[in-house]
Image (cartoon, rainbow, N blue to C red):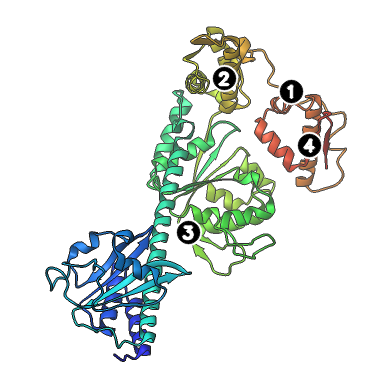
Amino acid sequence: MSLNSHHLLVEVALDLANSLNTGDRFDRLLGSIRKAIACDAVVLLGFRDGMLTPLAMQGLSSDVLGRRFLLAEHPRLQRICDSNKPLLFANDCDLPDPYDGLLVSQLGNLPIHSCMGLPLYSDNQLIGVVTLDSFKPYAFDEIELKTLELITALSAATLKTALEFKKLELSAHHAQEVVKELTQEALLKDGGEIIGQSPVMQTLKNNIELVSGSNFTVLITGETGVGKELVARKIHQLSERKTAPLVYLNCASLPESLVESELFGHTKGAFTGADKARAGKFQLANGGTLFLDEVGELPLSTQSKLLRVLQSGEIQPVGQDKVEHVDVRIIAATNRNLEKEVENEQFRSDLYHRLMVYPIHLPSLKDRGEDVLLLAGYFLERISRQLNIRQLRLTSEANTSLLNYSWPGNVRELEHVISRAALRAKAASPHQAIVSLTSELLEITADKPVGNLPELDTNPVNSLPHMSLKAATEAFQKRVIAHTLQQADGNWAMAAKQLQIDRSNLVRMAKRLNITVQKNTQITFN
């Protein structure tokens, strides 16, 4: 049989281009093959792990799609798979046919007929086969090899495309499930519960419930360690976006040169080291919530671009001319006084007002009264499981110490104090089922000073050369931190307590200011 191969190519390609889904694409492929080659049955099978699985068929009973053909049990199919080119079986071939009794127009064993198989390869790997059967003897004998090669190539390309689409669908589904699991994990982190019954906490909970149902931008303020991230997670959890991603970014942890890329993404080659394109936090959070912690640390150059997102929902990845639109709710947090930052021209006034759509202030732990005991109970229960202690309890003196302490590190400091005390108590009483934490183990007392900044030997203003306010502030911070670390013999925790900030924030600030502690307790900074 003679066939215009070029005409077939165009017709099949157009048919496949119009296909809407994998099943439709397979049916169009088989229909095009039957237009080119007259046959009574045609089947597309996928190959994997020594087995052929029917993906689409025409001319056979419907149950064929539920069958699985092991090559070890079907020598005719095995022969096709072993071939690297179209294989035509002799009319009197005695190998059993896998479709015996399955043709819709013929019952019982197949009579003498024509049978042909096309092995489908991609990157030299077998991915499937196409089989053709005809009741007419010698039906396939006159087909040009070029035609068979063309049909084989088209079938292989169609199958490969379908497999790639399926792989992408599975990958996308898996990514969605991962995001869902990670989001749920984030929501449940630290219990996912805001603990407290004091009046200020009741007001806080009411504000959270009120704003969660909207898409308003929220600015969470408060001292370090009061639980700003927990509040952000709670707002997301109660919002309509709760099944979408909750993406976290600590603005203080990023070098200024990478902030824009981290927020908005970048294209391949956008800057030195950008060896591939990378999505930014706004793209990852599309449809969900982006939590910008320490938003007050953003450089002014980036603040203007963040303002643009809040105004229009538009982002522009680094190195890309095209603008992208995103649907992201912003929750920001800071321990800075942004109003003063605006006055000092360290924070944009327009961005400040955009973030202040709904402000939420978190109270300090020292202002929450007996909430400290509720939080202590929560940490005691969690830590007892971690340390495999059946019961952890506080003595009455320990309760008094907790209530009278001023908690410069807030809830985070309380957790660390309980953790250290529990570890010491377990070491002192390794075999007791009920372990008590005393005031001595807590190492806090009502009259213990929170920490006073040591006097510096020189006047900080007079000793600084003429410079900008930002540079002068950083220079003073360097000297104060270095001096405090020197007084504390290089002990970060002790220095943090004297400076009334959280230890992790002190370490991060010192790293930003290039302050290092050497083994000989020598403090240096550049």
Type of the residue with mark 4 = Thr
Image position of 390 with respect to 111: above or below: above
- Residue appearing at x 53%, y 7% in the figure: 396
The residue tagged 1 is 452
Q: Where is residue 353 shown, x and y percent of the image?
A: 55, 49
- The quarter holding residue 522 reads top right
The residue tagged 2 is 418
Q: Earlier in the sequence, mark 1 or mark 4?
A: 1
Q: Where is residue 85 shown, x and y percent of the image?
A: 40, 76
Q: Is residue 525 visible?
A: yes
Q: Is residue 211 visible?
A: no
Question: Callout 4: helix, strand or loop?
Answer: strand
Name the foreground residue: 67 vs 225: 67
For disc 3, the neighbor class at 10 Å (few under 14, some 14 to 19, many from 20) is some
Q: CA distance from mark 2 to mark 4?
A: 29 Å
Q: Is residue 370 left or right of residue 464?
A: left
For disc 2, the neighbor class at 10 Å (few under 14, some 14 to 19, many from 20) is many
Q: Which mark is residue 326?
A: 3
- Which-is-in-front pick, marks 3 and 4? 4
Q: Where is residue 409 shown, x and y percent of the image?
A: 62, 27
Image position of 353 with respect to 12: above or below: above
The residue tagged 4 is 516
Q: CA distance from mark 3 to mark 2?
A: 43 Å
Type of the residue with mark 2 = Ile
Q: Earlier in the sequence, mark 1 or mark 2?
A: 2
- The quarter holding residue 125 reads bottom left
- Which-is-in-front pick, marks 3 and 1? 3
Quadrant location, the N terminus: bottom left
